[in-house]
Amino acid sequence: MKVVSIISTKGGVGKTTTAANLGGFAADAGLRVLLLDLDVQPTLSSYFTLALRAPAGIYEMLAFAERRIEQLVSRTAVAGLDLVLSNDDRGELNTLLLHAPDGRLRLRHLLPALAPLYDLVLIDTQGARSVMLEMAVLASDLALSPVTPEILAARELRRGTLQLIEDIAPYRHLGIEPPPLYLLINRLPPVSSNARLIQQTLRQVFQDHAGVRVLDTDVPAIEAYPRAATRGLPVHRVEFRQPAGRVAPTALQTMRTLASELFPQWQERFALVTGRPDAQATAGSASHGERP
Ligand SMILES: Nc1ncnc2c1ncn2[C@@H]1O[C@H](COP(=O)(O)OP(=O)(O)O)[C@@H](O)[C@H]1O
Ligand SMILES: [Mg+2]
């Protein structure tokens, strides 16, 4: 089971969008995927229609160490894509975890219960520095941080996200290595041809940070993302054909490239995802239940 936290100390950079679309894409590739919504504002929790709503959610999971899957896990309308709902309406978890001796490690300690059931766990987080965010990173094999191409965002990243990674470094002494941080350039303006330049600049800014990598994949700013969110669908199902006159790759191509760069071990499955409505049954649901 691979665990990925999607983090940024800045809001509106595309964390929830990335979690929903990467999760939906991996599920359509036949992987068993679990989304954890750690944001107090339940944006990810309301992205997909639910096929089955569990009585409990992230609050019971973290506050009471609830492990019963039927209590915790809701099923989305996308086959193979499950979700632990955000239900910490009053924002109590952060304080609770701050004062618990095992607070920052609580999620990490709960993950073995999920390992036999899922291939991939994606953790969506709130855009602010918090105990919850540190807890998510400490539970992850890798941290993925969307960055929008303004230089301001890069500065914020330096101050916020990198500081977070440095602050959890002492957990090394407990045998917990901070995960590598992958930066994903998101919302690249379609007309600008300076994608490469932005990537080079980001690479230069972070070249002396071991453990930080700027991904080769970038995500263009296209209207398919908000449209997919409105329809409650993973974006690769909404835009799998090249719209006339568009230079940027389709959302399907982008998600496939991103998923393959993050998880090369599943590349062959990803290549088979077509996004076409008639294909979901064969590519996705038919293979769920098998080990990939
Ligand atoms: N690549 C993109 N192209 C166009 N719109 C995007 C893209 N990525 C995200 N958005 C839009 O930006 C807004 C903020 O994204 P969201 O994922 O909610 O950010 P965060 O979770 O980091 O606060 C949403 O309306 C989303 O649809
Ligand atoms: Mg969000």
Image (cartoon, helix red, strand yellow):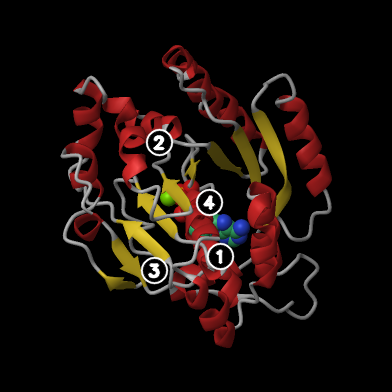
What amino acid is at disc 4? Gly
Q: List x then y, in percent, for residue 103.
A: 27, 26
SS for tag 1? helix
What amino acid is at disc 2? Ala
Above or below residue 220? Residue 241 is below
What amino acid is at disc 3? Phe
Nearer to us of marks 4 and 2 is 2
Q: Tell me: 244 left or right of 157.
A: right
* Mark 3 CB lies closer than 8 A to ligand 1: no
Q: Tell me: 80 left or right of 55.
A: right
Residue 208: mark in rendering = none
Residue 67 seen: yes
Above or below residue 158? Residue 64 is below
Q: Earlier in the sequence, mark 3 or mark 1?
A: 1
* Mark 4 CB lies closer than 8 A to ligand 1: yes
Q: Earlier in the sequence, mark 2 or mark 3?
A: 3
Q: Which residue is mark 2?
A: 136
Q: List x then y, in percent, for residue 203.
A: 76, 32
Residue 25: mark in rendering = 1
